Image (tube, coloured by chain):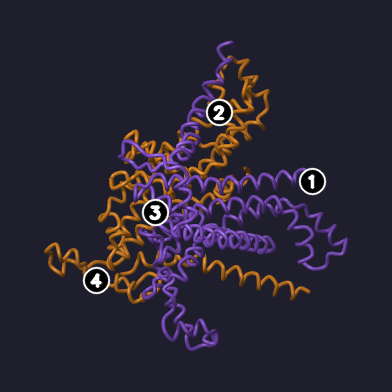
């Protein structure tokens, strides 16, 4: 038996070593490097203080980077959460065929995003794409009373991915398309956890409409699910890369309007070998993720104290 | 009342069907284009599966063959070109190898650690678990840059090692298995110890079999994430096509796509996306469990 006393060392040892080397050490390296002008192949690097961070918070390129990232995140997160919840509520209230919709809406979560991005690029193609071709069918109908539509018919419909005004929203749309099925499944799981009795109790207390029972029972009971769904959607959408790289391998889209953070790290560090600035963006990125997760944990804990 | 109920139900179906059309649109585009000839793709004609009229393969003519010998059926042309123009089979094999290696190593590292955290008492256990909880906060993609530099310093970029190493430690796997092991009764382990089993064989002969359901869910979570991963392979594999995973192979295809290559490219996309979709259709409940596992964090 005494031989077994230290067995745990063999069990946790490999995991501990890997955690330090693969997860913690890189953060320290990035932190250190963000104060230098290091690049691969150079034997030495100079200490540059806060210069990299100063660039990130003053240069217009990085202002665009934050603009694109936040635009994407603040469109994709509410939309994926809202559509996920909406789809879950609708499917949950169906008497039949709910599973069919669930399967369909979950498909994009399974499909390799890089492959689907390439397909969407086809669909959004200005001349041979199915989307503008379909829009053209609507010309000459009542739809032309919508001035945006009439303009599209008279001249051309948007170029979507290559138009500065549309690019980030089109990329966001693909993010929403890909992500809301995941949230729907989490919400469906949350909905099955709500006891039926609560709805009866709410009815007794005078909840008349469906809206009342949603407001009084469903929404509060889904609170923990919502906190989790919002956090995970935030972290995932901050990490958007595949679509951006597929559409704009160079430069981050028309006038850098889709220059999101992960792409910026890739471009600066990997393509241009500017490791210092890449490391600084990495640190800012990790800061965002950390703050978001801490807010989530705080919300979860506050809730459990109430309960 | 009955009538109002069914109009409500119908309305819900209308909304959900409209949603389903948008969701399925790219899948429709992908599959139909993989069946169509270049001309049909350019003119948006040919219906669902194309007319399958023979067309002239320009590359074949360029190689000095007679035009009459170079007439090809669109869907056969698209799928054979997908496999012949790039070593797609090799990419698929790489994908399988990398995904399987990652999962195996994750289990070998995580399972003993989870067992120790759940069932053994030792000094510093809470600290180790605290560390696991902290590491759950770190998205590996976000620290890709320092990892890349470390691998470059070791001369390991452009290798299978580089594709696998960052994913060998899954703190999420440790956390998940630990939570599962907590529910396994101590009596089971004590009985095994009485029988003279070593701690090591308890893990693999007693704990592993009880953990199969959790392990399956984790397997799906892991395989889906790494089969579809594009960001990390893009960073560490530069140029060496022998090491390309399916997403990289498809991306490269796009890089040199001209008009004639749209069909084959879509065929490649179909080939890459299909395995997971088919597996998902067959074991839907398990898949949804696996993918949403992270919901337990």
Q: Chain of mark 1?
A: A
Mark nearer the viewer, 2 or 1: 1
Mark 4 surroundings within 10 Å by alpha-carbon count, few (fewer than 14), some (14 through 19), many (20 or more): some
In this orientation, which residue lies closer to the viewer: A301 or A223? A301
Question: From the viewer's perspective, is the residue at label 2 or at label 4 nearer?
Answer: 2
Q: Earlier in the sequence, mark 2 or mark 3?
A: 2
Left or right of A301, for residue B180? left
Question: For mark 3, what is the residue?
Answer: B272
What chain does badge 2 belong to?
A: B
SS of the residue under disc 1? helix
Marks 2 and 3 sit apart, C-alpha to C-alpha, by: 34 Å
As displayed, is residue A120 above or below residue B221?
below
| Residue B106 in sight from this viewpoint | no
| Whether residue A275 can be seen here | yes
Residue identified by numbered label 1: A306
Q: Position of residue A49 (x, y in %)?
A: 46, 42
Q: Quadrant of residue A301?
A: top right
Q: Position of residue A74 (x, y in %)?
A: 57, 61
Which label is found at residue B113? 2
Q: Colour of chain A?
A: purple
The residue mark sitting in front, 2 or 3, is 2
Mark 2 or mark 4: which comes first in sequence? 4
Asked whether, in this view, residue B39 is left or right of residue A297, the answer is left
Q: Colour of chain B?
A: orange
- Nearer-the-camera pick, A119 or B146: B146
User: Mark 4 highlights which residue?
Assistant: B55
Q: Secondary structure at mark 4?
A: strand
């Amino acid at each position: 038996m005494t031989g077994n006393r230290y067995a745990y060392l063999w069990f946790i040892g490999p995991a501990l070593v890997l955690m330090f080397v693969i997860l913690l050490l890189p953060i320290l390296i990035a932190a250190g490097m963000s104060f230098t002008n290091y690049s691969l192949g150079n034997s030495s690097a100079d200490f540059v203080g806060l210069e990299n961070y100063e660039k990130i918070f003053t240069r217009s390129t990085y202002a665009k980077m934050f603009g694109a990232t936040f635009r994407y995140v603040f469109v994709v997160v509410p939309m994926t959460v809202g559509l996920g919840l909406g789809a879950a509520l609708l499917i949950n209230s169906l008497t039949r065929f709910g599973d069919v919709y669930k399967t369909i809406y979950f498909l994009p979560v399974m499909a390799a995003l890089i492959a689907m991005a390439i397909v969407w690029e086809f669909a959004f193609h200005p001349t041979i794409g199915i989307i503008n071709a379909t829009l053209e069918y609507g010309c000459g109908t009542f739809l032309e009373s919508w001035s945006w539509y009439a303009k599209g018919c008279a001249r051309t419909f948007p170029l979507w991915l290559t138009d500065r005004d549309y690019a980030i929203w089109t990329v966001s749309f693909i993010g929403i398309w890909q992500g809301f099925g995941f949230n729907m499944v989490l919400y469906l799981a949350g909905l099955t956890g709500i006891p039926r009795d609560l709805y009866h109790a709410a009815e007794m207390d005078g909840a008349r409409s469906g809206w009342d029972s949603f407001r009084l029972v469903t929404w509060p009971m889904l609170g923990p699910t919502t906190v989790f769904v919002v956090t995970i959607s935030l972290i995932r959408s901050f990490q958007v890369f595949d679509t951006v790289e597929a559409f704009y391998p160079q430069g981050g889209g028309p006038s850098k309007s889709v220059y999101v953070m992960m792409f910026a790290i890739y471009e600066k560090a990997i393509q241009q070998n500017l490791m210092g600035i890449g490391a600084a963006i990495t640190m800012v990125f990790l800061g965002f993720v950390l703050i978001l997760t801490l807010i989530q944990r705080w919300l979860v804990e506050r809730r459990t104290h109430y309960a | 009342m009955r009538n109002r109920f069914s109009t409500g139900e119908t309305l819900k179906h209308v909304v959900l069907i409209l949603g389903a059309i948008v969701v399925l649109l790219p899948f429709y585009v992908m599959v139909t284009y993989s069946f169509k000839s270049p001309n049909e793709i350019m003119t948006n004609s040919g219906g669902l599966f194309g007319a399958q009229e023979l067309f002239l393969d320009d590359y074949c003519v360029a190689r000095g063959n007679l035009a009459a010998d170079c007439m090809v059926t669109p869907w056969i042309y698209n799928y054979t070109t997908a496999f012949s123009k790039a070593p797609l089979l090799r990419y698929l094999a790489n994908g399988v190898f990398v995904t399987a290696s990652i999962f195996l190593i994750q289990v070998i590292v995580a399972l003993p650690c989870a067992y120790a955290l759940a069932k053994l008492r030792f000094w510093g256990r809470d600290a180790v678990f605290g560390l696991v909880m902290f590491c759950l906060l770190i998205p590996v993609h976000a620290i890709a840059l320092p990892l890349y530099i470390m691998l470059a310093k070791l001369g390991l970029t452009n290798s299978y090692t580089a594709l696998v190493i960052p994913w060998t430690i899954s703190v999420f796997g440790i956390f998940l298995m630990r939570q599962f092991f907590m529910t396994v009764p101590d009596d089971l382990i004590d009985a095994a110890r009485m029988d003279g089993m070593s701690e090591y064989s308890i893990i693999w002969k007693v704990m592993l079999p009880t953990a199969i359901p959790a392990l399956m869910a984790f397997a799906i979570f892991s395989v889906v994430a790494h089969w579809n991963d594009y960001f990390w392979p893009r960073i560490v594999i530069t140029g060496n096509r022998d090491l390309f995973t399916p997403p990289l192979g498809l991306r490269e295809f796009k890089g040199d796509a001209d008009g004639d290559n749209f069909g084959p490219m879509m065929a490649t996309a179909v080939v890459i996306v299909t395995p997971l979709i088919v597996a998902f259709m067959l074991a839907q409940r398990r898949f949804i469990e696996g993918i949403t596992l992270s919901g337990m964090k």
